[in-house]
Amino acid sequence: MNGVQNRRIITQNLYAGEKVLKCFNSDFQNLQSNTRYNVLIENHKNDLKYSDLLPKLKGKSILAGLKMNGIRASYNNAPNKIDYLKKAVKFQKVANCQERAFLVHNELNNMGIQSQNIRLNFIPKDGQDINKNHAFTVIGMAENADPAKPKTWGENAVIVDAWANIVKRASDGLEYLKGLFKYNPEVETYELSAHRNI
């Protein structure tokens, strides 16, 4: 494939991702996320200028987490999971990365655009259990791509992440997410895998 074709394809994928993210943000306004609150708390826990805000974020995280647990318990048993999830998210005004990835994947599917949800796990080197994970959607993966190996995704792969509110080329998106989660290669590794859709 020549350079002009590649630029056209990546531009189309970025445009499709931006369109889906815009629709998502229009359809699901003011969503809360206990995991997003927890990332903010973790990233600012030693910053004195946030000391008054952290307890409020913790309270919001607990409330959003309770709502999220209720949604997850319900949609897993619903006959039409995606329709139930859409209604529950709109009503409760809460969704974590997994639910957002499900909704983004579904919308892309409705547009006739193939996508794959991906799970990103951060694994402590000291043998403790996985302490951070994240789900997002990738469009434009190469035909024989291995979800666990981003280098095989191809140069047209684009990350669409409604939780982090980004649409980026895959390599840039992964670097952004590692920064967001304060990835530290001295104390942890990370792995990627295909994540389910509903």
Image (spheres, rainbow, N blue to C red):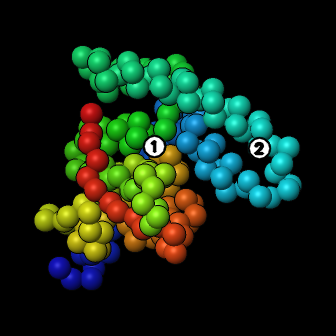
Looking at the image, do the residues carrying marks 1 and 2 touch, with CB atoms under 8 Å apart? Answer: no
* Residue 65 against residue 5 in the figure, above or below: above
Please give left or right for residue 141 compared with residue 14 in the image.
left
In the image: residue 194, left or right of residue 127: left
| Relative to 152, residue 18 above or below | above
Q: Is residue 177 visible?
A: yes
Q: Quadrant of the C terminus?
A: top left
Q: Position of residue 72 (x, y in %)?
A: 40, 26
Graded by Cα atoms within 10 Å as few (under 14), some (14 to 19) or many (20 or more), the crowding at tag 1 reads many
Q: At which x and y percent is residue 119? A: 35, 52
Residue sticking out furthest to the front: 127
Q: Residue at 74% across / 53% down in the picture?
A: 45
Image vertical order of residue 119 relative to residue 57, above or below: below
User: Foreground residue, 197 or 185?
Assistant: 185
Which residue shows up at 57% across the image and 37% down it?
33
Q: Label 1, label 2: how many angstroms apart (C-alpha)?
A: 21 Å
Say which amino acid is labelled 2: Leu
Residue position for label 1? 97
Q: Which residue is mark 2?
A: 54
Q: Secondary structure at mark 1?
A: helix
Which corner quadrant of the image does residue 87 belong to? top left
